[in-house]
Amino acid sequence: MSAGPSGPTENKGQPGLVSAALSGLCPRCGAKTLFAAPAALADACSACGLDILALERGGRFVGVVTMLLALVLILAALGVDEWLRPPLWASLLFWAPVTIGSVIGAIRLYKTMWVYHQYEESQPS
Ligand SMILES: [Zn+2]
């Protein structure tokens, strides 16, 4: 093999979690089937039949994570508002996509991390 490992890793051929979250890759077959909607997991992988819903079970903190992130963003938005006093339309124009993008990104990353963790736990070693 020509590609040398850049660090100690147990997983062979697994994509990084961030790229897995961005593309929604199934932890078993690597198909882009993990997400049915931008921030909602599919029930099962349509390529290999992996039961994603069962793996998601227990990942209930996602609501807390989302609310904390939204709170931080709202506080940041209020802070910028106090500081720059931008017109309302400019605030909305800037913060709406930033908030939506961050929340969706955080949910995707969190759910992907959770499902991959659960998947590895469920594998016999
Ligand atoms: Zn699959």
Image (cartoon, rainbow, N blue to C red):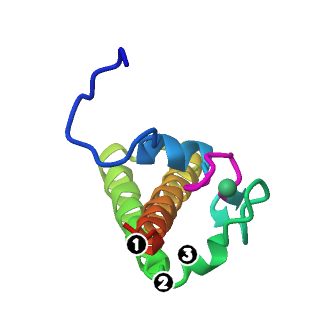
Disc 3 is placed on an element classified as helix
Residue type highlighted by circle 2: Arg
Q: Position of residue 66 (x, y in %)?
A: 46, 70
Question: Along the polypeptide, which appears first: circle 2 or circle 1?
Answer: 2
- Mark 2–mark 3 CB contact (< 8 Å): no
Q: Residue furthest left?
A: 8
- For the magenta stretch, what is the residue range? 26-34
- For label 2, count other residues whose C-alpha is less than 10 Å away and answer few (under 14), some (14-19) or many (20+): few
Q: Which is more foreground, mark 2 or mark 3? A: 3
Find disc 3 in the rendering and name its residue: 55
Main SS category, magenta section? loop
Please state which of residues 107 and 80 is positioned toward the viewer in this rendering: 107
Please state which of residues 3 and 110 is positioned toward the viewer in this rendering: 3
- For label 1, count other residues whose C-alpha is less than 10 Å away and answer few (under 14), some (14-19) or many (20+): few
In the image: residue 57, left or right of residue 49? left
Disc 1 is placed on an element classified as helix
Find disc 1 in the rendering and name its residue: 121
Q: Which mark is residue 60?
A: 2
Q: Is mark 3 within 8 Å of ligand 1?
A: no
Q: CA distance from mark 2 to mark 1?
A: 17 Å
**In the rendered image, the vertical position of residue 121 relative to residue 110, given as above or below:** below
Q: At x 30% / y 48%, what residue is drawn?
A: 10
Occupied quadrant, residue 16: top left
**In the rendered image, the vertical position of residue 8 relative to residue 79, given as above or below:** above
